Amino acid sequence: MTKEVKIGLIGIAALAMLIYGINYLKGINMFQSANYYYVEYTNINGLAGSSPVFANGFKVGTVRSINYNYKKPGHVTVEVEVDKEMRIPKGSKGELVTEMLGTVKMNLLLNDKTNEFFQPGDTLPGITNNGLMGVAEEKLVPQVEQLLPKMDSILQSLNKLLADPALTATIHNAERLTANLDVTTRQLNSLMNNELPQITGRLVTITDNFSVISENLKGIDYASTFSKVDSTLYNVQLLTEKLTRKDNTIGLLFNDPTFYQNLSTTTANAASLLEDLKAHPKRYVHFSLFGKKDK
């Protein structure tokens, strides 16, 4: 065998291995027997070649190719390769499901109510199921579109609010208030740590003093004290009554006008006599060393 033949065989083997590797990566097993079916859609929703084909959640095949059906405009034919043992009952459908991340897979919805089966090469009807993404597109997108003008209005109002100088002033006031609260907190901590023990000690002293006073008050004979007070008040009452009656000297002094007038007259005469005595002492007192003289 010449060197050129060896190189050719090595190239053919490398090409075959490359083709096998590419198909293996696509999920196509070239050494496994398979049946081919066709599924017809009006919209494949982004289905790609080599996508898996499932039946009852189990992978049974692979999308082999996707071709536009020029004989039936508006239709796309998908060729699927399924396991040789897989038999598809008539009435089954190929459903395209759009997953959350946007990938599309094919589910074979098998009709288990018949014993008739499609033959390899037959065409199955296809349907689409937009899944959660479709529901979101159908229901959420219109709502989002309705909310967009409101969101725009809210953003404009928010921009006006943020641009308002009053907001900046409010923030500064809040900062000052926070600083004042911090100072107040430190002062309260200082008071709690330094002044409060002294105040507590003074309160304890005052409490002790009140206790001593309370003990002293307990030793007072309130009954005897109030009895003496009552006796004193009674004597005051008797004195008051005597002062208002005329059967005693003090009562006459306060209540008899005649006695008062006589006393006033006597006082006035005594005063006049004293004045005359001061003015004419010789009328009342005579002193003589040689005896009394006739006037």
Image (cartoon, helix red, strand yellow):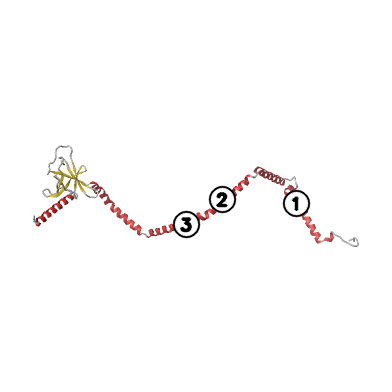
Badge 2 crowding class, 10 Å Cα cut-off, few under 14, some 14 to 19, many 20 or more, is few
Nearer to the camera, 238 or 243? 238
Nearer to the camera, 246 or 95? 95
| Residue lying at the far front of the rendered structure | 1
Q: Earlier in the sequence, mark 3 or mark 2?
A: 3
Name the disc covering residue 186, or none.
Answer: 3
Badge 3 crowding class, 10 Å Cα cut-off, few under 14, some 14 to 19, many 20 or more, is few
The residue under label 2 is which amino acid type? Val
Residue 180 vertical placement versus 55 (above, below): below
The residue under label 3 is which amino acid type? Arg
Question: Can residue 39 be spotted in the picture?
Answer: no
Q: Secondary structure at mark 2?
A: helix
Q: Earlier in the sequence, mark 2 or mark 1?
A: 2
**Residue 221 pos. (x, y %):** 65, 44
User: Spatial distance from mark 2 to mark 1, Cα to Cα?
Assistant: 68 Å
Name the disc covering residue 50, or none.
Answer: none
The image quadrant of residue 88 is top left
Q: Nearer the viewer, mark 1 or mark 3?
A: 3
**Residue 144 pos. (x, y %):** 27, 51
Q: Earlier in the sequence, mark 1 or mark 3?
A: 3
Residue 220 vertical placement versus 191 (above, below): above
User: Which residue is under mark 2?
Assistant: 204
Measuring 75% from the left and 51% from the top, which residue is drawn there? 261
Question: Can residue 267 be spotted in the picture?
Answer: yes
User: Which residue is under mark 1?
Assistant: 261
Measuring 30% from the left and 53% from the top, which residue is drawn there? 151
Nearer to the camera, 74 or 289? 74
Residue 86 is left or right of residue 260, and the answer is left
Q: Is the N terminus in the top left, top right, bottom left or bottom right quadrant?
A: bottom left
